[in-house]
């Protein structure tokens, strides 16, 4: 991790100069993979360091050095090897999808975009630094935003409202700073697309994200299906919540509170307790998954405790040279932390299961399936929440999770619809006021049942609080697609858990060796956007929620 490009470059030169023929291509690809993975892990470790402590100047400088001095020449060198391989006409077993992806990446590559890609990541880093340092004074304590969110579960409505308003006040204080970062991001992304010969960044992102099996029109169809099927179901759920709370209208600070009036779920007192009980869950769910989770503990591959200066959110990255995952999260003792941990463990298990594939290109799994293992894990672990709760609280926790899945689809449609508008209207989207307006329109269309009157500034700046928009453009519809797959995994497991888990793990083992519909098929799922498929999932969720309401009363 201290090497200069001059020390790395000879390895690329060696691969460029070696004979490439039928009897050498497999070793050539393996050696390229070894080099690629080493540099990939280097970047992953540096990025992780900046997230673990957003105030670590040395880590930030090291990551920026990587972005400036290592990543651009690496991408150029990788492109040269890609071009050489594609021009050779050679292939190896299980590599057809990888070759398809390599061809798309080669067509997209422009050396003039390398400094822009580096600049884009720096702007995303600046955004994370802003939101990562948001703190508030609350009842004599200094809290992070994640810690303050816990107050939204308080049984007293005035308490929740005070916490929510303080949270929004804090977010809005950074409004101008985030708007400035955003304007620069849109400008950079527009230029990247222009350099690649494409009319919009959406066209660029579609190809960059290797979306071969659906189109932007399919996304719009998915939005329409959500509006037709899920929005009314979510509205019914919100209205039930309103009645249970005994309020005239449901406000934003009424969404996270338990409808029974009981105190918020407090499943653990320490991260050590969270990990120990999660270990029990995975061991009971599937011994191999339990073994993977134990490996992560043995190798210190998790940082899940919230603290000041730590970037918000959660993710699972991979250390490719060692073929192991790393989980980053922000646990504060709430039920949501359990769901976050098991979600990221789904990603981690995917890394373990696909680690046998010999070539790095085979690890380019479509994101639309990559989220299925993680989101399915949120549902597969529900029967084992007795490790944290008694029967009554387990019912509350299960209800909370199923409610979240059902109400997620409309929110996803807002986020995805917003991004389609942004990158179809790049000039207008550089003005944050236009973004506020469009976000507000989409919110009113999909998020029906919650009263935001008098809270317009907080409502229209909701896009500021969705990190994917800044850090991973056009990475969000995958969650909606994957939840539709995850509910199918859950339904299969309710009928035959052994077979469902067998198919689930088999699909993960395929990595990126088959296309997206075939990955779903391997997991015994249907990849679709239509209202009928969505309706079946919603019916299952609503039926289960109705049964749980009897236990909540």
Image (cartoon, rainbow, N blue to C red):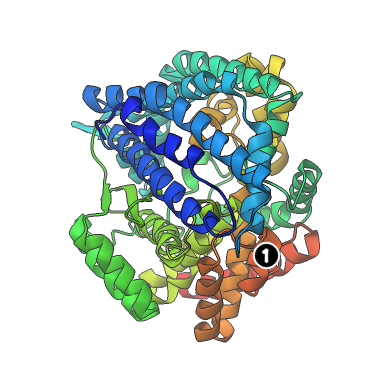
Is residue 356 found left or right of 510 in the rendered image?
A: left
x 36%, y 57%: residue = 323
Establish if 487 lies above or below 178.
below
> Residue 267: horizontal and vertical position, in percent?
28, 62
Label 1 packing within 10 angstroms: few (<14), some (14-19), many (20+): many
Residue 510 percent coordinates (x, y): 55, 66
Give the residue at mark 1: 538
Q: Nearer the viewer, residue 263 or 203?
A: 203
**Vertical order, 354 against 436 (above or below):** below
Q: Nearer the viewer, residue 238 or 66?
A: 66
Residue 165, image x, y percentages = 42, 30
> Residue 123: image x %, image y %?
46, 21
Residue at 70% x, 55% y is 230
Residue at the image position 44 percent from the left and 58 percent from the top: 347
Vertical side of 250 occupied by 162: above or below: above
Q: Up-down: is 137 above or below 178?
A: below
Give 237 or 377, whichever is nearer the viewer: 377
Quadrant showing the N terminus: top left
Q: Is residue 243 visible?
A: yes
Residue 447 visible within the image = no
């Amino acid at each position: 991790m201290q090497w200069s490009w001059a020390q790395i470059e000879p390895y690329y030169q060696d691969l460029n100069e070696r004979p490439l023929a039928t009897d050498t291509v497999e070793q050539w690809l393996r050696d390229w993979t070894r080099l690629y993975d080493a540099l990939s892990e280097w970047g992953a470790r540096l990025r992780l360091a900046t997230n673990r402590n957003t105030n670590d100047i040395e880590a930030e400088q090291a990551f920026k050095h990587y972005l400036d001095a290592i990543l651009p020449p690496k991408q150029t060198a990788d492109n040269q090897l890609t071009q050489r391989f594609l021009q050779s006409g050679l292939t190896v077993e299980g590599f057809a999808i990888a070759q398809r992806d390599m061809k798309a990446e080669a067509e997209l590559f422009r050396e003039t975009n390398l400094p822009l890609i580096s600049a884009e990541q720096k702007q995303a880093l600046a955004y994370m630094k802003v939101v990562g340092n948001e703190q508030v004074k609350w009842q004599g304590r200094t809290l992070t935003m994640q810690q303050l969110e816990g107050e939204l579960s308080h049984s007293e409505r005035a308490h929740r409202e005070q916490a929510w308003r303080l949270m929004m006040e804090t977010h809005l204080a950074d409004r101008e700073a985030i708007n400035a970062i955003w304007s620069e991001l849109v400008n950079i992304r527009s230029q990247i697309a222009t350099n690649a010969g494409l009319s919009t960044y959406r066209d660029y992102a579609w190809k960059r994200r290797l979306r071969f099996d659906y189109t932007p029109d399919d996304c719009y169809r998915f939005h329409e299906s959500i509006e037709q099927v899920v929005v009314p179901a979510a509205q019914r759920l919100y209205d039930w919540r309103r009645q249970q709370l005994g309020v005239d209208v449901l406000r934003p600070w009424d969404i996270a509170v338990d409808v029974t009036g009981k105190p918020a779920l407090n499943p653990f007192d320490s991260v050590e307790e969270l990990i120990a009980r999660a270990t029990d869950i995975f061991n009971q769910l599937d011994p191999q998954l339990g073994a993977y989770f134990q490996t992560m503990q043995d190798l210190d591959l998790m940082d899940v405790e919230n603290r000041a200066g730590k970037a918000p959110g959660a993710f699972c990255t991979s250390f490719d040279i060692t073929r192991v995952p790393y989980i980053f999260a922000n646990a504060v003792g709430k039920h949501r932390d359990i769901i976050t941990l098991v979600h990221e463990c789904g990603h981690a298990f995917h890394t373990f299961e696909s680690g046998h594939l010999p070539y790095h290109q085979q690890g380019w799994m479509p994101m639309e399936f990559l989220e299925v293992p993680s989101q399915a894990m949120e549902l597969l672990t529900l029967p084992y929440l007795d490790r944290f709760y008694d029967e009554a609280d387990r019912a509350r926790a299960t209800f909370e999770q199923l409610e979240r899945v059902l109400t997620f689809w409309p929110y996803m449609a807002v986020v995805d619809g917003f991004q389609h508008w942004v990158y179809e209207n790049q000039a207008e989207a550089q003005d944050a006021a236009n973004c506020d307006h469009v976000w507000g329109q989409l919110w009113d269309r999909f998020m029906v049942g919650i009263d935001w009157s008098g809270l317009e500034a907080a409502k229209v700046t909701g896009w500021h609080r969705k990190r994917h928009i800044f850090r991973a453009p056009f990475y969000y519809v995958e969650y909606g697609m994957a939840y539709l797959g995850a509910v199918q995994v859950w339904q299969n497991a309710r009928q035959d858990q052994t077979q469902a888990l067998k198919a689930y793990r088999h699909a993960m083992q395929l990595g990126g060796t088959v296309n997206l519909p075939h990955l779903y098929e391997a997991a015994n799922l249907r990849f679709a956007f239509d209202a009928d498929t969505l309706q079946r999932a919603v019916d299952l969720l609503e039926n289960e929620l109705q049964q749980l309401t009897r236990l909540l009363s």
